[in-house]
Image: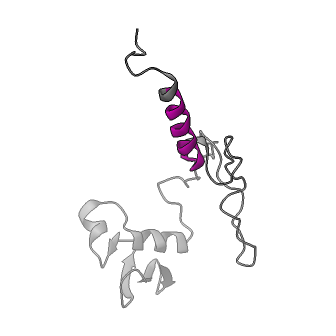
């Protein structure tokens, strides 16, 4: 909002929050504004506050200061944003290695060689045990 003096304690305030911008006449002597908010509530509207600050009169409310910055709980966010020209980081910096076959990108549980060897071992164990005996004795 911009305030322009149009006489002794009379102001014309241009409010740009409306489209197109609207003009309000503020009279500080009679405490009135064209929007009517000041007369209805008894409190100065935004247009009146702009006119008062333009006239360098002190307002009833003290000047507010921003709240103090406190350190937030948890892990801090990244300290910077990457530039557009900076190379993209690769998805993985490590690879999973199978301890059974030493292959890459899988572990023992997903190893393709392990089930076939396990079947061979089971077949050998079943061949060693006699057909009439149970192993749960």
State the residue in front, 122 or 133: 133
Vertical order, 11 against 134 (above or below): below
The percent position of residue 92, horizontal first and vertical second, equals 67, 58
The percent position of residue 70, horizontal first and vertical second, equals 63, 42
The percent position of residue 136, horizontal first and vertical second, equals 40, 13
**What residue appears at the point 44 percent right and 20 percent down from the top-left corner?**
130
State the residue in front, 88 or 91: 91
State left or right for residue 13 relative to residue 100.
Answer: left
The percent position of residue 65, horizontal first and vertical second, equals 59, 52
**Residue 20 inside the magenta-drawn segment:** no
Task: Give the quarter of the image for residue 108.
Answer: top right
* Image quadrant containing the C terminus: top left
**What residue appears at the point 56 percent right and 33 percent down from the top-left corner?**
121
Q: How is this picture coloured? A: one colour
State the residue in front, 52 or 136: 136
Is any part of residue 28 visible from this angle?
A: no
Number of numbered discs present?
0
**What residue appears at the point 58 percent right and 53 percent down from the top-left corner?**
66
State the residue in front, 114 or 94: 114
Task: Give the quarter of the image for residue 85.
Answer: bottom right
Residue extending furthest toward the left: 40
Vertical order, 48 against 136 (above or below): below
The residue range painted magenta reads 110-125
**Residue 115 inside the magenta-drawn segment:** yes
Is any part of residue 23 visible from this angle?
A: yes
Residue extending furthest toward the right: 86
Vertical order, 102 against 37 (above or below): above
Residue extending furthest toward the top: 137
**What residue appears at the point 50 percent right and 84 percent down from the top-left corner?**
5
Vertical order, 127 against 78 (above or below): above
Q: Main secondary structure of the magenta part?
A: helix
């Amino acid at each position: 909002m911009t305030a322009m003096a149009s006489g002794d304690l009379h102001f014309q305030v241009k409010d740009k929050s409306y489209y197109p911008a609207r003009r309000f006449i503020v009279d500080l002597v009679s405490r009135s504004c064209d929007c009517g908010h000041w007369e209805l509530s008894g409190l100065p509207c935004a247009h009146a506050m702009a006119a008062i600050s333009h006239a360098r009169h002190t307002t009833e409310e003290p000047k507010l200061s921003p709240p103090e910055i406190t350190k937030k709980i948890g892990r801090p966010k990244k300290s910077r944003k990457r530039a557009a020209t900076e190379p993209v980081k690769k998805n993985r910096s490590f690879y999973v290695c199978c301890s059974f076959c030493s292959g890459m990108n899988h572990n023992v549980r997903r190893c393709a060689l392990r089930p076939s060897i396990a079947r061979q071992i089971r077949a050998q164990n079943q061949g060693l045990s006699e057909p009439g005996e149970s192993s749960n004795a």
